[in-house]
Image: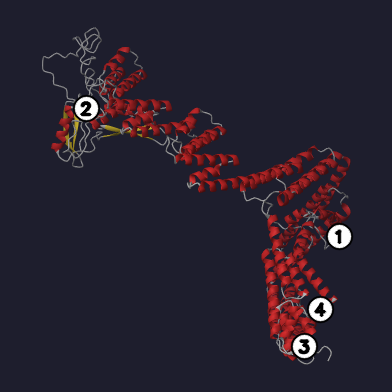
């Protein structure tokens, strides 16, 4: 029988399909269906862009009142002009309309290539799948319209899954029944585009009767949905019932849905004509209509009727509520008028203020009158003009008019401007320029570029020149977009990317953009070549056994390929040399340090720092890290010194601070640990002073340890400086007599210098022994130097019966302050027993050239403390006092003085003098201290106390300034040290 091929096994069908035994060509109908499918898929991708572009084109400053017949002519002109702009819509502008991210230097070009590659792969796999041409074309078209690699891959998977599923179904088919046509079945499989359609084909073969029933049910559903669409129901209600039809499992269920829909319609009609209470309230009527349109059952309709009737009844008994509803209705009507938001808000506020229904109606009439006046002005009263600036201004003014009188004023003003423009061509050109500048501002250019083109517009002599500027600006924008998306070489170097963007933002012509592209592309290539050279160099270093990260870092810091090569070769050379033993070589570290110093100095010079003193500091650094730190600090200080927002540390000050630190470290390294010497270093005002002081201290320290000849000890050096300081202090007090300076220079000890200086100052002041009335103002305000503070503190102690010591501190303002204390300096440690304290005091007196007495007291902490002091011998009755006036005084001028030239002096050169260079002094560094004993647990320095008696000849007086600290330190270290 024709077309009635019965197969023994269902697998034969699948086999025939899979090997292409039966592969019918597409019919015209199938081809048409396929083309329709392609168009639908393609249109999906373009619809959104079209909508966005149309929305952008339809924007205009003039209110587009398309709903008003009177405005159609005016709007037509506007849209006509906008049609001309459609040709200007380019990919870059479409991107703006879609609010895409700003254009940046990314690998967009590579991304597009990757997507295309993914699409080609997906289509190849689809074509290899066991599908019909129709099915392959369907999925291929979906892949073509994919916007991501993932989407393309998903369509490929869907196609392959469908092919697998069809194959499984084919192999599961039983023998064909009588009357079944294999070609029809094959065609059905070839047209199936998803698993649901495949299942239908399978059922038509396996269960023809069931398939027939399904088809009848589908036909009934389609017919029922058509009937529902014809019913006078809302769209919401129709969609609801049609969805119930789709869910129905049999014909009875479908018929039940149709009956329910008709029942709902009858209920709605009955409610409108019979059950809803009559009312003239439009708001209630509108609400009832909306609620009935959303009702889905007869019960819903009855609930609506109940609720609306209650509102009608409530309104009759509440007039305030009725006025409120009238106002709401009026505001809704105003919102529908083609007025600006400003005008709508104005009239709605008037509605809120209305006291009754008549007042509300009056506001509505005024609003409508304003609208009619605006329409009449646009169509009849405003003078015609093609000046978009005037048109825009007219539109804005009409949008802000609130009365018919306002509109008439706008018409009068605008018509005058139109007339003035005709009689004033200069004004017209000016307005053209303003309009052109607004157009420039809308372009996606940098502010620099916009300003450039706007300045050219200002210089233009005519409209043609203005238009040329606009064309040049657009040409520049196109060139920049083309450069970013197509011409600039891709790179992941953020520095180059930013540089390219900055340069493009400053480009003013298409030629400049092309030049930038060439330059950046060269830099991208050079950066890549440099990166490759660095990687290659590091690889070579590793191969040579060099693994230190410091060397790799140096390679990575190189700026050129030549630099990389030179550095690599030097490192390899130094590495090789360091492994040889045929003489001293420069190590890699040394070589790197030398180069780091050179680089740092070059960087300082580039920053404008040329002082040799800074380069010397760099060259003294011992490590690469030290070079870097020093360079950064100098640069930081240099930058800070150029700012004017407050006091800064200058480079010189910073270098002085570091010079002091280095000097102190050098002293410590030489074994000098006394804070006294460190304080002297810290008081130096210049780097040269620091160096000189450090060298003198080191020299004196070294000399004190040698015994091969007379040397200047540290104590002698300090004595010399104490004399200099004392003389300077006398001069500062206004004392200039050489006789006083000579007396100072004859003193043999620092204590004698201080005592003599103080007595001279006291005598010069003319009020010895008197207590100062109050603390001087400068004490409250601090002192500029530590020395000044110490001098002031010593003077304060001289007349203070309570306090016995002081401390100096530096405040946050940089000034120095002293604080007096009743605790004697150096007596803070104490002894466990009185006997220990007395023994220490006696031992201290043995080596004390000034004091001759002591006293021991127990402190609040239970420990015992001693104090040394000078006690004058009592004068016997009848004994002459050599210091009294009229008596011969060996210290008076004219008399022989053992301290004057020519007189025999026990301290004369050649005779042994404990203060003379070359003689061992137990108080000097390096000498053995006889005061050391092993049975003492604590160290107690002796205290030299200022004797307030007149002791010029003995050199005993108050200790001040630096020398007081020195005396305490010297005695503590070398004379009465206890453990």
Vertical order, 831 against 965 (above or below) = below
Q: Distance between the residues labelled 4 and 2?
A: 125 Å
Name the residue that disc number 4 marks: 24
Contact? badges 4 and 3 (CB < 8 Å): no
Write down the quadrant of residue 864 in the picture: top left
Name the residue that disc number 1 marks: 72
The earlier-in-sequence mark between 4 and 3 is 4
- What percent of the width, then of the height, locates residue 131? 74, 75
Q: Distance between the residues labelled 2 and 1?
A: 118 Å
Q: How far apart are marks 4 and 1 (CA)?
A: 57 Å
Name the residue that disc number 2 marks: 922
Dot 1 crowding, Cα within 10 Å, few <14, some 14–19, many 20+: some
Question: Which quadrant is the N terminus positioned in?
Answer: bottom right
Q: Distance between the residues labelled 4 and 3?
A: 28 Å
The earlier-in-sequence mark between 3 and 1 is 1
- What percent of the width, then of the height, locates residue 230? 81, 81
Write down the quadrant of residue 288 in the picture: bottom right
Dot 4 crowding, Cα within 10 Å, few <14, some 14–19, many 20+: few
Task: Determine the secondary structure under disc 2.
Answer: loop
Task: Determine the secondary structure under disc 3.
Answer: helix
Name the residue that disc number 3 marks: 216
């Amino acid at each position: 029988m024709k077309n009635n091929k019965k197969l023994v096994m269902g697998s034969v069908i699948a086999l025939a399909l899979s090997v292409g035994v039966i592969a019918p060509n597409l019919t015209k109908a199938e081809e048409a269906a396929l083309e329709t499918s392609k168009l639908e898929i393609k249109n999906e991708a373009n619809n959104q862009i079209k909508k966005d572009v149309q929305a952008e084109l339809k924007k205009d400053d003039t209110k587009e009142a398309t709903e008003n017949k009177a405005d159609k002519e005016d709007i037509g002109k506007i849209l006509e002009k906008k049609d001309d702009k459609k040709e200007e819509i380019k990919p870059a502008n479409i991107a703006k309309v879609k609010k895409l991210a700003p254009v940046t230097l990314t690998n967009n070009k590579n991304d597009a290539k990757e997507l295309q590659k993914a699409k080609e792969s997906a289509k190849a796999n689809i074509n290899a799948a066991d599908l019909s041409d129709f099915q392959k074309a369907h999925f291929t078209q979906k892949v073509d319209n994919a916007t991501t690699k993932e989407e393309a891959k998903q369509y490929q998977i869907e196609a392959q899954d469908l092919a697998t599923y069809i194959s499984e179904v084919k192999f599961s088919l039983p023998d064909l029944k009588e009357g079944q046509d294999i070609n029809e079945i094959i065609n059905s499989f070839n047209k199936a585009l998803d698993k649901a359609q495949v299942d239908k084909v399978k059922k038509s073969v396996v269960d023809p009767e069931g398939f027939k029933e399904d088809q009848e049910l589908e036909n009934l559903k389609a017919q029922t949905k058509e009937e529902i669409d014809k019913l006078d129901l809302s769209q919401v209600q129709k969609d609801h019932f049609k969805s119930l039809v789709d869910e129905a499992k049999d014909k009875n269920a479908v018929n039940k849905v149709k009956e329910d829909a008709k029942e709902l319609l009858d209920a709605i009609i009955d409610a409108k004509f019979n059950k809803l209470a009559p009312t003239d309230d439009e708001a209630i009527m509108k609400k009832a209509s909306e609620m009935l349109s959303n009702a889905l059952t007869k019960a819903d309709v009855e609930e609506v009727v109940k609720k609306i009737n209650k509102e009608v009844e409530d309104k009759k008994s509440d007039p305030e509520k009725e006025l409120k509803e009238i106002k709401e209705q009026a505001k809704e009507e105003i919102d529908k008028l083609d007025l600006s938001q400003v005008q709508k808000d104005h009239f709605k506020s008037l509605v809120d203020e209305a006291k009754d229904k008549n007042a509300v109606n009056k506001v509505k009439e005024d609003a409508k009158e304003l609208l009619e006046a605006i329409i009449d002005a646009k169509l009849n009263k405003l003078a015609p003009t093609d000046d978009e600036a005037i048109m825009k201004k007219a539109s804005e003014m009409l949008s802000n008019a609130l009365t018919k009188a306002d509109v008439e004023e706008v018409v009068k003003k605008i018509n005058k401007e139109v007339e003035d423009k005709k009689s004033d061509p200069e004004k017209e050109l000016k307005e053209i320029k303003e309009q052109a500048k607004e157009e420039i501002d809308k372009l996606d250019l940098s502010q620099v570029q916009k300003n450039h083109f706007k300045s050219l517009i200002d210089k233009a002599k005519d409209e043609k020149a203005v238009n040329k500027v606009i064309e040049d600006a657009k040409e520049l924008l196109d060139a920049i977009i083309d450069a970013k998306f197509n011409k600039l070489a891709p790179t992941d170097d953020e520095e180059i990317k930013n540089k390219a963007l900055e340069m493009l933002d400053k480009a003013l012509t298409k030629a400049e953009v092309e030049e930038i592209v060439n330059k950046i592309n060269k830099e991208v290539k050079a950066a890549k070549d440099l990166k490759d050279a660095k990687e290659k160099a590091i690889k070579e270093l590793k191969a040579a056994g060099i693994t230190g990260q410091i060397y790799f870092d140096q390679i990575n810091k190189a700026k050129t390929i030549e630099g990389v090569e030179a550095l690599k070769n030097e490192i390899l050379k130094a590495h090789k040399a360091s492994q040889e033993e045929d003489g001293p070589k420069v190590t890699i570290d040394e070589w790197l340090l030398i180069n780091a110093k050179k680089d740092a100095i070059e960087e300082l010079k580039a920053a404008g720092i040329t002082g040799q003193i800074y380069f010397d500091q760099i060259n003294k650094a011992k490590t690469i890290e030290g070079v870097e730190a020093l360079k950064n600090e100098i640069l930081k200080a240099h930058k800070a010194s150029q700012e004017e927002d407050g006091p800064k540390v200058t480079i010189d000050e910073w270098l002085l601070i570091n010079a002091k630190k280095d000097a102190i470290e050098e002293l410590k390294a030489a074994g000098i640990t006394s804070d006294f010497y460190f304080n002297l270093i810290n008081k130096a005002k210049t780097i040269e002073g620091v160096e000189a002081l450090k060298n003198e201290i080191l020299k004196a320290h070294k000399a004190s340890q040698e015994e091969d000849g007379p040397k200047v000890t540290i104590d002698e050096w300090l004595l010399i400086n104490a004399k200099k300081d004392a003389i300077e202090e006398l001069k500062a007090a206004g004392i200039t007599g050489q006789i006083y300076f000579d007396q100072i220079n004859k003193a043999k000890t620092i204590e004698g210098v201080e005592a003599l200086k103080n007595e001279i100052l006291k005598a010069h002041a003319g009020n010895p022994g008197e207590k100062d009335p109050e603390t001087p103002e400068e004490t409250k305000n601090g002192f500029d130097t530590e020395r000044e503070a110490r001098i002031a503190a010593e003077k304060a102690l001289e007349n203070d019966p309570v306090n016995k010591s002081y401390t100096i501190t530096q405040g946050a303002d940089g000034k120095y302050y002293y604080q007096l204390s009743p605790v004697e300096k150096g007596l803070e440690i104490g002894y466990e027993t009185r006997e220990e304290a007395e023994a220490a005091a006696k031992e201290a007196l043995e080596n004390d050239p000034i004091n001759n007495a002591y006293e021991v007291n127990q402190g609040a902490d239970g420990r015992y403390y001693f104090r040394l002091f000078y006690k004058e011998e009592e004068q016997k009755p009848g004994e002459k006092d050599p210091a009294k006036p009229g008596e011969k005084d060996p210290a008076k001028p004219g008399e022989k003085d053992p301290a004057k030239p020519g007189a025999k002096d026990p301290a004369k050169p050649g005779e042994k003098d404990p203060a003379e260079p070359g003689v061992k002094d137990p108080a000097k560094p390096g000498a053995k201290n006889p005061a050391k004993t092993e049975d003492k647990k604590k160290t107690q320095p002796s205290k030299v106390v200022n004797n307030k008696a007149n002791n010029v000849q003995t050199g005993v007086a108050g200790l001040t300034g630096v020398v007081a600290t020195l005396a305490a330190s010297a005695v503590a270290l070398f004379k009465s040290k206890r453990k």
